[in-house]
Amino acid sequence: MKGRISTNTVGWMYGFVHFSVEVCCFYFLFSRFRYSALWWVYAFLFDALAFIPQCFLGLWVDRMEKELLGIIGCLMLLLALFLPFDVPAFFLLTLGNAAVHISGAKHSLSHAGGKIGPCSTFVAGGSFGVITGQLLGGMEQSLLWIPCGCMVVALALCVVAFLLHKTDKEEACSFHVSSDKLSLGMIVLLAFLSAAIRSYVAYAIPTAWKKDTLHAILLFSSMGIGKYMGGVLCDRIGYQKTASLSLLFSLPFLLFGNELMTVSLIGVGLFSMTMPVTVAILASAFPKNPAFGFGITTVALFVGVAPVFFFRPEGLLVNQLIVLILGAAAAVSLKFSLKKRC
């Protein structure tokens, strides 16, 4: 059964919603806490509380014929921006973030006809929102009207998706890409490992070239473009080819782009292309619970980023070894968790 607007259209709609959510969240974090001695605590808790609940929210949303989480999440985020009490506003912000994310996953995976492109479009919008929110929140003057305006538009888009896009349980997800030779537990473990590695490696990539705001914008943009193009390629040439080629070609660029911005950015974009592959594997593994599958990837992202808050490897050679070893591990994980021909 088809809705009155296509899942592809909803993917672009939720791409802007995701952009707006990250603008809102990172504006909030940087404008309120960037000078706090507890900055790293807030950043760690934000990742934990925004990522981990999505797994459980996904199970809940997958049972619903129609879900309101996107609308509720947008309202929570708007309220957090204006709430004068930092700690309550912070917790409201994290839960609103999780709610909108899982709503976007539900809409972009439902009735996609086995295409991961709509979901990759949705996810890619967040990379541009993160750097935009950081820059706006780091300004000395208040620019609150910008994240507020973005969230009002996002709220309107979530209402449109709720009214015009079907997310019922019948034929909601039709991905068939996970291995038919491994147990469900092993497939989940391998996909989880791949997503966690991608999250951690993002902080281990040698980037001595990143010295100013423009460089940061280009880095986040490369991530966003890579996630989007990963979905496009998966739908056109298949998941195995996309995963293998993106990881194979990304490693030389990542390893030797420390002083070469263009080389490094190409590597970052290629490495980011694996994002839609892991989502599709888990959506395939849980055909009746695609939002839950998406939530597993967000838990993996937190597991990957958590060590960075406590220690970071030093030295070019050490980081190159980490990228090489973990990149190879991610390639093996995706290779075996996917069907041979998909």
Image (spheres, rainbow, N blue to C red):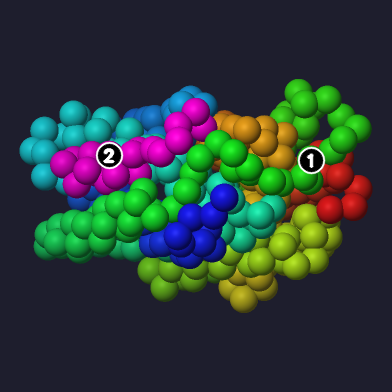
The percent position of residue 79, horizontal first and vertical second, equals: 16, 41
Task: Give whichever of 96, 105 is nearer the camera.
Answer: 105
Which label was assigned to residue 72?
A: 2
Which label was assigned to residue 200?
A: none
Callout 1: few (<14), some (14-19), or many (20+) C-alpha neighbours within 10 Å? many
Query: Residue, x 8% and y 38% (percent of image)?
Result: 84
Residue 181: name its quadrant. top right
Q: Examine the rendering and report whether any part of residue 47 can be seen.
A: no
Count of labels in the image: 2
Secondary structure under the numbered disc 1 in the rendered image: loop
Callout 2: few (<14), some (14-19), or many (20+) C-alpha neighbours within 10 Å? some
Q: Which contiguous range is marked in magenta?
A: 62-80
123 lies left or right of 73: right
126 lies left or right of 132: right
The percent position of residue 186, horizontal first and vertical second, equals: 79, 27
Residue at label 1? 178
Query: Residue, x 26% and y 30% (percent of image)?
Result: 91
Task: Give whichever of 210, 44 is nearer the camera.
Answer: 44
Query: Residue, x 38% and y 68% (percent of image)?
Result: 213
Q: Earlier in the sequence, mark 1 or mark 2?
A: 2
The percent position of residue 246, horizontal first and vertical second, equals: 76, 61
Which residue of the protein is positioned furthest toward the bottom in this rendering?
Answer: 262
Query: Residue, x 84% and y 38% (percent of image)?
Result: 179
Which residue of the protein is positioned furthest toward the left in this rendering?
Answer: 84
Residue 120: name its quadrant. bottom right
Q: Does 73 lie within the magenta span?
A: yes
The percent position of residue 90, horizontal first and vertical second, equals: 24, 34
Task: Give whichever of 308, 191 is nearer the camera.
Answer: 191
What is the three-letter code of the residue carrying label 1?
Ser
The CA span between labels 1 and 2 is 33 Å
